[in-house]
Amino acid sequence: MMSKTNIFLVGPMGAGKTTVGKRLAETRGMEFIDSDSEIEIRTGVDIPLIFEKEGEDGFRKREKLVIAELAQRSHVVLATGGGAVLDPDNRQWLAARGLVVYLHASVDQQLQRTARTDHRPLLQNVPDRRATLQRLFEMRDPLYREIADLVIQTDGRNARVLAREIEDHIDRPATAL
C-alpha cells in the first residue's frame, strides 16, 4: 500500500492526464485538480492568451506558484501541465508530496490527440508539429522519469484501463523484505 495521500500525474500533452485524473479521483473519492485549468480560473483568461501576453516564462512563473500551492493540499489527484517538470522546484515538490505517475505517450499518440486543437500554445504556428513534439519529448522525458514513482504506457489505452492500472499499483500490498 502506498503511503502518499496525493497522486500527481505528469507527462506530455495528449497523454491523458486530465481524463485519467478525473476518473482516478472519482473512483478513489479524491478531489481532482488540473493545474492549467486552475491557472485559467485564477487569471480569468485561457493559457494561449497568457502565452501571447507574457510568453512562456510568464506562464511558467504562474504555473510554479499554482503547483507550489496545490502540491501542499491533501487527498488530491493533480494533473500537471506538460512543461511543469521543467522547473526544479516543481519536480522537488511533486516528488516529495505525492505519488508521481508518468503517463508516457509516444509522439505519434500526442500528434493524434492534439491534431484538432488550437489550445496548445507550443503547437501554434509551428511548421512541423511532429518535430516540435519530438523535441519536447526528448527534453522532458528524462525529467518525468526522474520524479516518477510509476510509469504507465498510455498508447492505445483508454482512461478506465489506465486508472485501474494506477489503482492496482497503489492498492498492491507492500511485499515483505
Image (cartoon, rainbow, N blue to C red):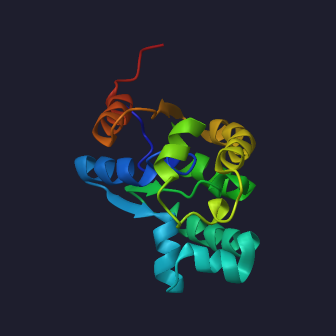
The answer to whether 92 is drawn above or below residue 53 in the figure is above
Name, please, the residue furthest toward the front: 127
Query: The N terminus appears in which quarter of the rendering?
Result: top left
* Pick the front one: 139 or 122: 122
Seen in the image, is 150 located left or right of residue 87? left
Which percent across, then down, holds residue 48? 59, 74
Q: Farthest residue in the bottom direction?
A: 44
Query: Which image quadrant is residue 67 in?
Result: bottom right
Q: Position of residue 106 (x, y in %)?
A: 56, 35
Q: Residue at image x 60%, y 46%?
A: 95
Q: As displayed, is residue 58 above or below residue 142? A: below
Identify the residue shown where x is 54% and y is 84%.
43
What percent of the width, then of the height, locates residue 166? 38, 35
Which residue is located at x 53 percent, y 75 percent?
A: 39
Q: Is residue 142 left or right of residue 63?
A: right
Q: Residue at x 68, y 79 (%)?
A: 52
Q: Nearer the viewer, residue 105 or 58?
A: 105
Q: In the orientation shown, which residue stands out farthest toward the top?
A: 177
Q: Is residue 126 visible?
A: yes
Q: Which quarter of the figure has residue 162? A: top left
Q: Position of residue 109 (x, y in %)?
A: 51, 39
Answer left or right for 20 relative to 54. Answer: left
